[in-house]
Amino acid sequence: MKSNIFIPKTINVGFQNRSDTYTKKLAYVIYYDEKGVLRKEKSWNSWRDEKIDPREIENVPTSGFVINKKVGGYSTGWNHRQTYVRIYDPRNFEFEISVPNLLYILENTNSIKGKGLEGEFVYGWDGTDLLLIPTSSPDYEELTTYNEKMFNADIIKAKDLTVGATYLTKDNQKWVYLGKFDYWDNVRVSDGFKDEPSGWYGSCRVEQYHYETQVKDKRFYFCKLVQCNNKPEFYELKSINKKFISVVNNKCVDNYAELFEMLESSNVYYSPIDDTKDEYIPYSLEEFKTYMLNKAGGRYVNHLNDRKTSYTNTWVRSDDDNMYTIGYKGNPVTIEEIYDEFKPVIYNQYLMNGKLYKGRY
């Protein structure tokens, strides 16, 4: 389950009369957010029967939920209905959840015949999608902590930011503040106006322009560490207004210097690519052999013909690790023959700050 599921303190339940339900009432459940705003109210009002009074209910752990039946899962002409599962709420109404939500519930609790779902549950929302969350799930404690921070969010202003400190976003992500720096981008630059023909109307004044890479403004730079391979992602914000809900750690992270080095060598908004610094370094035969043995075999070799012709090809390793098949000829050739014919090079790009460009990590 996602770590940024919103668990409201109060839900609002609207109803329609339905003969195919146990209670004869089907519910549409919406919620009040952390600011007290009733979310999805417009669609809720258009769906519910105004003759049936809605109910505001405190969203506290509650037991007694029962799986009723599957609904939807058909397609007739233009009429498509996704599969849902109807659930009985012990407060005497029925509502619908998705099949993935049901599978998550059954991974974390039991459904006892004649008694319903075991344990206590609360309502939660993943964006606009309603979820029923078992309090016995391993995610519940973390979600509860996150939601308490949402309801008691710190007011974090730009002047309060500390370089190297870690902050929690509204999406329950931990971001490290790297500092406020220039933000480079392509900017439209006017070359003046020129008379151009415009059919029946003679000529008209048309603005001529081109794009240049310039400093657009200054922005707040942050880094988020991605769990997979621990790769950082960089973000540039014009404003931090309402972005963060708490300070995780106001002390500088131990690897700040490493993160900043990655920013300097991989982020083209921090420092753009400088084409005048392009560098082509010829491979030695031994370097190229190592490269081919490590990189070839169903992959593309990109460093041929000085990259000036954008020449790429697929090389397939043979059984003896010394012969390769070149795709466009289909003839086995040796690494030495490839080296002699293509004169492979290492292509380096540099940023304006002089750092070797390493792309996104």
Image (tube, rainbow, N blue to C red):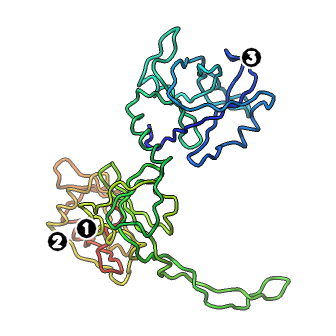
> On screen, 103 above or below 229?
above
> Seen from this angle, which residue lies furthest left?
286
Mark 2 or mark 1, whichever is nearer to me: 1
Residue under circle 3?
19
The amino acid marked with disc number 1 is: Ala
Residue under circle 1?
257
Q: Going by the image, does 272 lie left or right of 32?
A: left
Distance Cα–Cα, label 2 vs label 1: 34 Å
Residue beneath the point at 64% across and 19% down? 92
Residue under circle 2?
284
Distance Cα–Cα, label 1 vs label 3: 65 Å
The amino acid marked with disc number 2 is: Ser
Residue beneath the point at 29% across and 51% down? 229
- Of label 2 and label 1, which has the lower sequence position? 1
Please name whichever residue, 277 or 96, is drawn nearer the observer in this view of the structure: 96
Q: Going by the image, does 201 lie left or right of 181?
A: right
Spot occupied by residue 252 in the image (x, y as percentages of width and height)? 28, 63
Spot occupied by residue 27 in the image (x, y as percentages of width and height)? 67, 27
Q: Label 2's element?
A: loop
Q: Callout 1 environment at 10 Å: few (<14), some (14 to 19), or many (20+)? A: few
Spot occupied by residue 54 in the image (x, y as percentages of width and height)? 72, 31
- Of label 1 and label 3, which has the lower sequence position? 3
Q: Label 1's element?
A: helix
2 and 1 marks in contact (CB < 8 Å): no
Q: Label 3's element?
A: loop
- Of label 3 and label 2, which has the lower sequence position? 3
The amino acid marked with disc number 3 is: Ser
Q: In the rendered image, which quarter is residue 89 located in?
A: top right
Please name whichever residue, 132 or 269, is drawn nearer the observer in this view of the structure: 132
Q: State the quadrant of the C terminus.
A: bottom left
Distance Cα–Cα, label 3 vs label 2: 80 Å
How many numbered marks, from 0 up? 3
